[in-house]
Image (cartoon, rainbow, N blue to C red):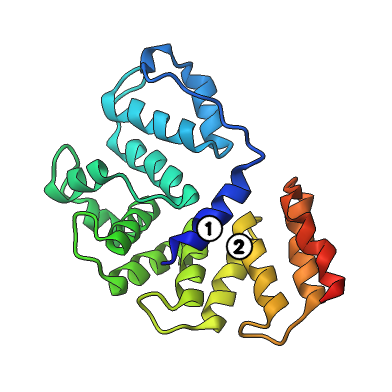
Amino acid sequence: MKLTKYVLLASLSFVCLAPKSFAADTKEVNVSELTYQANQGNTKAQTALGELYKQGKEVPKDYAKYIEWYTKANAKNGSNINIQLSKMYFEGKNLPQDYIDAANKGDVKIQLLLGMLYSKGDGVPKDYKQVVKWYTKAAEQGNVDAQLLLGIIYEDGEGVPQDYAKALEWYKKAADQTNVDAQILLGSMYRYGKGVPKNSEKALEWYKKVVEQGYQEIQHMIEVMPKE
């Protein structure tokens, strides 16, 4: 997918969160506070919490939770999935070999991870059929990150035929779960008539939902709408 757009959106979404800096020495970290910040969407906290579970410091060693928090951090900030994590997974180091079976049985976290790895070719050949397969499985179970990522893939036509109808479908599902990036992208599709007739009213509707969640940074998009 085209990360330029996604990184831009991610930086816009997280500008209001004011992430705290977490000490490299995990012994100095308050686990309760770290967990709270991670659940609020703080990507630094998510990464640090994943590291705690990986190392078994202050919390029981749990590789499933390690994957969960690293995946959340990477999904939302648009960065590449951690290379060490992907190598551990595909070389079978420390992680159980039955994770693919778990993904096939419906483990959403692993499905999302597999989609990310195949999209970047980390530990496996880059394969967009696999990307779409695993993201779709996760998205159909309601995973908002997978829904957003599928929308971006179909809108950009990266590795798949460009399909605005499918992009709209997945953006709408993610936007209905109050995902800010999806709401911005859905509004822009109505604004510029991608796959639908241009509709400034619908575009404004979605942009305002973003502002209502506290993201004033897109107010300028609303202000220029009547001039278009």
Q: Which residue lies furthest to the top in this view?
A: 28
For badge 2, the amino acid type reads Ala
Place of residue 56 in the rendered image (x, y in percent of width and height, measured from the top left) = 29, 23
Residue 153 found in image quarter:
bottom left
* Res. 179 in view: no
Image marks 1 and 2: residues in contact by CB distance under 8 Å: yes
Q: What residue would you read off at disc 2? A: 182
Classify residue 96 as left or right of residue 17: left
Decide: is 38 above or below 120.
above
Place of residue 85 in the rendered image (x, y in percent of width and height, measured from the top left) = 26, 43
Classify residue 15 as left or right of residue 51: right
Q: Residue at x 37, y 33 (%)?
A: 50
SS label for mark 2? helix
Q: Residue at x 55, y 26 (%)?
A: 20
Place of residue 165 in the rendered image (x, y in percent of width and height, measured from the top left) = 56, 83
Decide: is 228 above or below 51.
below
Sequence-wise, the earlier of marks 1 and 2 is 1
